[in-house]
Image (tube, rainbow, N blue to C red):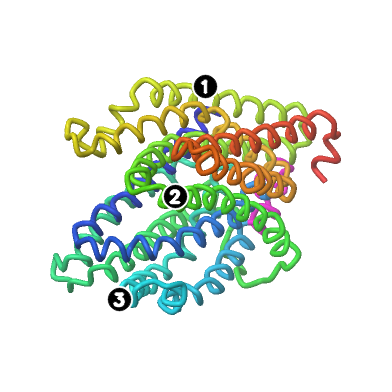
Amino acid sequence: MFILSLPLVGSQLAAIAMATTDVIMMGWLGPTQLAAGALGSAIYMPIMHFGFGVATAVAPMAAQALGARDFRGVRRSIRQGFWVAAAFGAIFAVPLWQSGHIFVLVGQKPELAALAQGYLRAALWGLIPLLWVIVLRGFLTAHARPRAVFVVMVVGIGVNALGNYALMFGNFGFPRLELVGAGLSTSVVDAFMALALIAFVLRDRRFRRYVLFARFWRSDWPRFVEVVRLGTPIGLMVLAESSLFGAAGLLMGLIGTAELAAHAIALQCAAVAFMVPLGISQAVTARVGLAVGARDHDGIGRAGWVGLWLGIAFTSISAAVFWLAGESLVGLYLDIDDARNAPVVGLAVSFLLIAALFQLVDGAQVIGAGALRGLRDTRVPMFLAIFGYWIVGMPTSAALAFWLDLGGQGIWIGLAVGLTVVAALVVWRFHRRERLLPALAVAG
């Protein structure tokens, strides 16, 4: 599990690095362009997260088919994953293309809306290739070969930075396109990663036998519907969590500027730490799926619980770092010796102390959800996530922040409560399914 998780964790960290590169280089253009880029991301990121969830459904389907030695089923699952990704990208291209009108309707400044729309119209061409990367990641992870994904994404960091440098700022003989250039660079790197992985699976001796793209246009509607059926709840579950933290930012903005800035710093630290259990959860999905396909009931439990304990081991370390070195982490973003930054530094450190407390449950909830996905159990976990995040977590944040006057700390305590509820529910559900259902019923 550890060996399988390492390249998946690295891939997630590479994705964070690419996004961070975009933000930094948008900032070089100026505050107006940075604000417009952030506005564009406000609509692009939820769509992308939802699409990631839908495409993730291919991972347990391919793993279960591989565990059952159904190689034709593996090929059909991957092929229909490509189909679903293409359909998803085509559907959501419409709101992305017309995003300027949407921004104006919700009260954004027309000049910012126009800049954000230009960025999104250039970036949307990379959405389908990016989702194909997620499909191929599930395929390679099921075969315990995710290192190729890691290598491609690390190279993608450099491709993205060079693309930004050329297209945003007019270097290497290219025109200066600013935010449109950033969007084009995003599409280029997404297409590069997809084509590189496609070339790998077509050339690798083990994967050539699948002939993934032979008769690519042959329909398989039952399996297409199965990808959508399994993937939509995963996408909504991911969206429920990401929107929780987005809503927390909105609440912080109601309290004050210092609280919002401190929230952004603490959230970025927590997001980087979260990439490790997220990568482990992808490995757990594959290992549980393989055991289900092989009708290895003991293997299902081993894969799930080993993944959970591995995640707890890491999150214990990240919790200790947040608790003991919070000020040093904040110092990566702000000059802690500047008296003007003192209010933000103090708040960010206090938020990291609370983040330290919920590191264990944050890791447990994502790995528990990954184990359930390996069982193709996605609908009930979606409802559990919505309940924990939005029925418990968000009201708790609002109540503590405004009714009990705990401010930003109250919001983060509410986040911790929501994550704890979801972690307890999904881990308990995996325990019940793993213990009480016979292997044949689980596989069915």
Task: Identify the residue under disc 2.
Answer: 249
Residue closest to the eye, 60 or 237: 237
Mark 2 or mark 1: whose residue is earlier in sequence: 2
Looking at the rendered image, the disc whose residue lies closer to the viewer, 3 or 1, is 3
Q: Percent from the top left, x then y, of residue 146?
A: 49, 42
What segment is highlighted magenta in the picture? Answer: 62-77
Residue at 25% in and 32% down: 331
Give yes or no for residue 68 being in the magenta stretch. yes
Secondary-structure class at tag 1 = helix
Going by the numbered disc 3, the residue's amino acid type is Glu
Secondary-structure class at tag 3 = helix
**Which label belongs to residue 40?**
none
Mark 3 or mark 1: whose residue is earlier in sequence: 3
The N terminus sits in image quarter: top right
The reply to whether the C-beta atoms of the residues labelled 3 and 1 are less than 8 Å apart is: no
Q: Quadrant of residue 438?
A: top right
Q: Looking at the picture, does residue 187 appear above or below residue 256?
A: below
Secondary-structure class at tag 2 = helix
Counting other residues with Cα less than 10 Å from the Cα at mark 3, is it few (<14), some (14-19), or many (20 or more)? Answer: few
Q: Quadrant of residue 296?
A: top right
Residue closest to the eye, 410 or 316: 410
Counting other residues with Cα less than 10 Å from the Cα at mark 1, is it few (<14), some (14-19), or many (20 or more)? Answer: some
Task: Identify the residue under disc 3.
Answer: 111
Give left or right: position of 326 versus 392.
left
Task: Identify the residue under disc 1.
Answer: 313
Give yes or no for residue 108 being in the magenta stretch. no
Residue at 44% in and 46% down: 149
Going by the numbered disc 1, the residue's amino acid type is Ala
